[in-house]
Image (cartoon, rainbow, N blue to C red):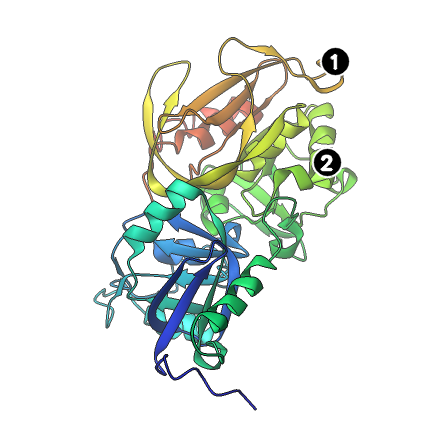
Amino acid sequence: MSNPIDPAYGEREALLVLEDGTTARGRAYGARGTALGEIVFATGMTGYQETLTDPSYHRQIVMMTAPHVGNTGMNSEDPESQRIWVSGFVVRDPAPRASSWRADAELEDELREQGVVAIAEIDTRALTRHLRELGVMRAGIFSGSDLPTVPGAQGVAALVERVRAIRPMAGQSLSEEVSTSRAYTVEPPEGTPVRGTVVAVDLGIKAMTAQRLTERGLRVHVVPASTTLDEILEHRPDGVFFSNGPGDPAAADAQVDLLRGVLEAGIGFFGICFGNQLLGRALGYDTFKLDYGHRGLNQPVRDVLTGKVEITTHNHGFAVDVPVGEPSNSPYDGGRYGRVRVSHVSLTDGVVEGLQCLDIPAFSVQYHPEAAAGPHEAAYLFDRFVAMIAPETAAMSAGEDT
């Protein structure tokens, strides 16, 4: 039997509580109850369905900075996985109904059906500025019978303590919580010749990633995060891919050891997002947590070698600590993997956005070249992967998405 709600809160109200004691009262949206996690903001003007279903947001409360959310509803074609992964959702002005011909369902209905607690009608701009100044922090959304049962500040203080009890994102290894439980294969589209075989280690992989690989003629074996090197080698791959995913790369020791085995086997490697951080660790570099991360569809990145600037899609709260400048020997085991250079940097804050190994076939980027939703300026990286692992057929696909 639930306790009576503090009369100061109405039945349709919700409360957002941050670990520093900041609170915001809004309208209950989606499911009723409690959502706990690290609160982050995403700057995309669209693509909220892809954001919600991105496994990289596991254990995070996502706040959309765009004021209008829900206009395009939800559909069966755009999800990046089989479920919504965010712990909670924060929006300012939700659309009362979808207005897209592609919509199969309303956003709020889908949130409610999947048990995702959300809050609407709060000042997301002010909250974003707060997080930019102080950094991401733990938070909770409370609605329905989970609103304070004790009146006033005392009731809110109890919720703040619940939020502070959440385990911080730093130090958490989460890939195996979102990874596939069994291996599966994605074939190239009908009529597309097979140009190579890739093993994609699912650390939180997005559906569009496999599509970008297969449309270039690569047969993709998607395997769990717990896969061993011997299991990868059984597929006789031309290349290995490490996907995006949630959690702290400093805690992913098993995946780092697996990647070192791939590099020592001489197999071509490509990693994105979490995969970029793991390549950095495998090469002997450290990683660190960003104050508030990069999340959105409009992040400028500069190619260090060419000077070209790309507008890219990001979703990461950690980064690799590698010196920008001339190539240098990787620090792991006396430079076992040879020379490494930073290939891309963020024009927002100078964070490393890409690595390239010069003596072994391996490269990675911190952003998302599959870009769903988002710009496609970085899709050429998939062609670069094909050229590295199947050079005799690379010309067949070069330039398809440059």
The residue lying furthest to the left in this view is 99
> Which image quadrant: the C terminus?
top left
Looking at this view, is 76 or 73 the one in front? 73
Residue that badge 2 annotates: 258
Q: In this rendering, is residue 131 above or below 87?
A: above
Identify the residue under disc 1. Answer: 334
User: Residue drawn at (74%, 13%), measured in percent from left and top?
Assistant: 334
Q: Total number of numbered labels?
A: 2
Question: To which quarter of the image does residue 345 belong?
Answer: top left
Going by the numbered disc 1, the residue's amino acid type is Gly
Q: Is residue 286 left or right of residue 150?
A: right
Residue 290 or residue 189, whichever sits in front: 290
Q: Toward the viewer: 77 or 329?
A: 329
Where is residue 194 drawn, in percent x and y?
53, 38
Asked whether disc 2 touches disc 1, contact meaning CB atoms under 8 Å apart, the reply is no
Residue in the image at 57% along x and 26% along y? 389
